[in-house]
Image: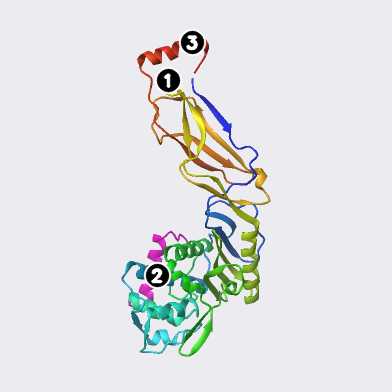
Amino acid sequence: MPRSVIAAIAVGIAAVFAIPASAPYAQALDTPARNAYVIDLATNTVLLNKAADIPMPPASMSKLMTIFMVFDRLKKGSLNLDDTFLVSEKAWRKGGSKMFVKVGDRIKVSDLLRGIIIQSGNDACIVVAEGLAGSEDAFAEMMTRRAKEIGLTNSNFANATGWPHPKHYMSARDLAVLSERLVTDFPEHYKIFAEKTFTYSKIKQSNRNPLLYRDIGSDGLKTGHTEEAGYGLAASAVRGERRIVMVVNGLTSIRERSRESLRVMEWAFRTFKPYALFKKDDVITKADIWLGDAPSVSLTIPEDLKLTLSRTARDKMKVTVKMNNPVAAPVKKGQRLATLIVSAPNFQTREIPLLAAEDVQQLGFVGRIGAAIQHVLWGSS
């Protein structure tokens, strides 16, 4: 008769498993940031989560959604970098960070993007909003709808700039998800984030992202500051095949933002490392077959298993296989017969299905009778 077994297949592997994006990581970094979220995109592993799902005032970091709306139109072909938008008096009068546009001018989309990304121009955001939606209010509604479509669950927009408003908020996790989409969906336009200066109206301004001036592989994204929000940064850096996305907010000064964002990014690269555990279609183990035309069937993993692991906890991982053994024939190729379980202390267990590598047919009537007699006489399965 089939019996339930758990077969250990990788005892003593020196690693600690990667966890899903919703799971807390055991080695949390103590940071003065009020909200923080750090994720390794290579394996979708969350490295730091501090109040990451609490809605917060994002200040100018919410301009990333304004930028996303433009990139999205460019990708779909309904907008061109050489298209121009008219500057209204509202845009010209807007305070805060400015691109220094002039009423009545028509400005290319390519320049407006740099005015937003590099100069953090509130005026440029309003020009874009009015050009795409007719009004900033209508554009904010469009932003909110599109945000929900791409999986931002704790975000709502009241304007295009991040100007303080009680109904304008995002979470740190949402900012990270949005940052990832900007990186992966629009590589041809994302490179603008790495540009350090932009000159418009004979006024040269520098990119406010402090990590761009450090040799850590940073290539984006956006700072933010208001009195209520504090100082924040959504940033990304790449080293080799690894890309880290980090969001910090609620810091007390420009200096603390610069220092803490560098410390957190360096910690993420230094403390964790990705490991390839299994490749797609690797044979993990075999299952015995009851009354089949083959004695066993190979079990394969349907996806690459690459994990971001803490270097200080690599000896604590356990990898096991849970299955009913033997398996009654017939078996179809691709049929789920077992589960690969990856676990470690204080971590959320990860489970991956294991699939039959080939068909196994059931024995004919005579074969089944013979197997039954053999089982009765000799106890063989």
Which residue is located at x 39 percent, y 81 percent? 127
- Marks 2 & 3, CB-CB < 8 Å contact: no
Q: Is residue 167 visible?
A: no
- The dot on residue 71 is 2
Q: Residue at x 47, y 71 (%)?
A: 191
Circle 2: element type: helix
Figure quadrant of residue 47:
bottom right
User: 238 or 376: which is nearer to us?
Assistant: 238
Indicate the secondary structure of the residue bearing disc 1: loop
Q: Position of residue 115 (x, y in %)?
A: 46, 80
Q: Nearer the viewer, mark 1 or mark 2?
A: 1
What amino acid type should be assigned to the residue bearing mark 2?
Answer: Phe
Which amino acid type is shown beneath numbered disc 3?
Val
In the image, residue 11 sits, relative to residue 187, either above or below, namely above
> For residue 376, which numbered disc appears in the image?
3
Query: Which three-letter amino acid code belongs to the residue tagged 1?
Result: Leu
Mark sitting earlier along the chain (1/3): 1
Q: Is residue 122 magenta?
A: no
What is the residue that sits farthest to the left in this orientation? 78
Q: Residue at x 53, y 69 (%)?
A: 219
The magenta stretch is: 134-154
Distance from disc 1 to disc 3, alpha carbons, whole Å, reads 14 Å
Figure check: 325 above or below 22: above
Which residue is drawn at the image coordinates 41% and 61% (left, top)?
148
Residue position for label 1: 291
Question: Does residue 234 lie above or below 108 as drawn?
Answer: above
Name the main secondary structure of what is drawn in magenta. helix
Is residue 148 in the magenta section? Answer: yes
Q: Position of residue 227 (x, y in %)?
A: 57, 76
Q: CA distance from mark 2 to mark 3?
A: 70 Å
Q: CA distance from mark 1 to mark 2?
A: 59 Å
